[in-house]
């Protein structure tokens, strides 16, 4: 009876794991990740911020195939008690092998890229607008449009896209969907996708800011990672089904 139970439980476990790996490698399910921050203003009041990204592909567990299009959802949440008067997102992709460091700006610290040319410079960024063909959707991917990528302060395109999220009440969440097409001529390697969410609100003590950053490594290469994951998932599914069948015979 003990052997029967172990085979049955083991078979069910392997079958579930196998099905999960296959579905995950195909992009049918995804795992959201994110960061959050909360800053106290005074007892009972605080400005809070949270950012998460939810990919429909298996990032970072498998390669991002060249020439393929990938999309993800970005959720910006006001986790504080104060309404945001304004909020916005900046999106950038660092060149292959670029490091990600923190840079102090007015209101806090954002994440930026660093390479041999320096830090937070256009030479260390990929052409996210024209080469990677970044698109944005506010209706879940039903319609897509070009994002605003002109720096509002300089009036130039510096390979950073600036997306306005506007005011957001306490406890509310606003989402946007993004997609990129990996250029076919890109070299294999890691390209950091850097997202910074910034919010501001006016208080009796002046303007308060909150910043949350998210970095998703894009492992550009072949589709090999997905294939390996599918094979492992299929093997686990087959073995699990065999154990279940054997245990009930």
Image (tube, rainbow, N blue to C red):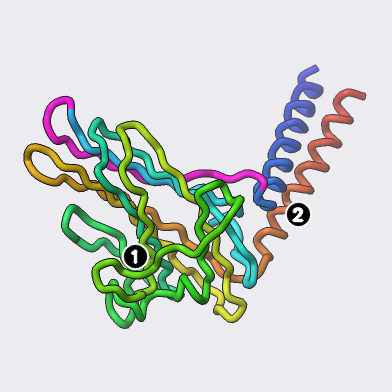
Q: Residue at x 7, y 40 (%)?
A: 205
Quadrant where the C terminus lies?
Answer: top right
Quadrant where the N terminus lies?
Answer: top right
In magenta stretch: residue 76: no
Sequence-wise first label, 1 or 2? 1
Residue 168 percent coordinates (x, y): 32, 39
Residue holding disc 1: 100
Give the quadrant of residue 14. top right
Label 2 secondary element: helix
Residue 206 vs 226, above or below: the answer is above
**Residue at the far left in the pictured view:** 205
Q: Which mark is residue 231?
A: 2
Residue 147 vs 164, above or below: the answer is below
* Residue span colored magenta: 28-44
* Tag count: 2
Q: Residue at x 43, y 68 (%)?
A: 93
Label 1 secondary element: strand
Q: Which mark is residue 83?
A: none
Q: Quick one: 18 or 58, which is closer to the camera?
A: 58
Residue 200 percent coordinates (x, y): 22, 47
Residue 219 percent coordinates (x, y): 54, 66
Give the quadrant of residue 37. top left
Q: Quick one: 239 or 159, which is closer to the camera?
A: 159
The CA distance from mark 1 to mark 2 is 33 Å
Closer to us: mark 1 or mark 2? 1
Q: Is residue 34 visible?
A: no
For residue 142, side relative to residue 134 (left or right): right
Q: Residues within 10 Å of mark 1 (few under 14, many from 20)?
A: some
Residue 68 vs 6, above or below: the answer is below
In magenta stretch: residue 42: yes
Q: Residue at x 35, y 70 (%)?
A: 150
**Residue at the far right in the pictured view:** 249
């Amino acid at each position: 009876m003990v052997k029967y139970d172990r085979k049955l439980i083991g078979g069910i476990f392997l079958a579930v794991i196998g099905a999960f790996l296959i579905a995950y490698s195909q992009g049918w399910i995804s795992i959201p990740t994110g960061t959050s921050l909360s800053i106290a203003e005074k007892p009972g009041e605080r400005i809070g911020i949270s950012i998460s990204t939810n990919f429909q592909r298996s990032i970072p567990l498998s390669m991002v195939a060249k020439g393929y299009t990938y999309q993800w959802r970005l959720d910006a949440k006001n986790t504080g008690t104060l309404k945001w008067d304004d909020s916005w997102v900046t999106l950038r992709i660092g060149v292959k092998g670029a490091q990600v460091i923190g840079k102090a700006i007015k209101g806090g610290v954002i994440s930026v890229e660093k390479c041999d040319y320096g830090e937070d410079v256009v030479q260390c960024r990929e052409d996210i607008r024209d080469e990677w063909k970044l698109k944005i959707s506010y209706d879940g991917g039903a319609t897509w449009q070009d994002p605003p990528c002109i720096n509002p302060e300089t009036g130039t395109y510096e390979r950073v896209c600036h997306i306005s999220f506007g005011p957001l009440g306490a406890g509310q969440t606003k989402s946007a969907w993004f997609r990129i097409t990996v250029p076919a001529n890109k070299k294999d390697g890691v390209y950091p996708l850097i997202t910074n969410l910034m919010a501001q609100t006016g208080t009796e003590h002046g303007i308060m800011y909150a910043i949350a950053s998210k970095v998703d490594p894009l492992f550009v290469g072949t589709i090999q990672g997905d294939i390996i994951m599918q094979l492992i998932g299929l093997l686990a599914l087959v073995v699990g089904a065999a154990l279940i069948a054997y245990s009930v015979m």
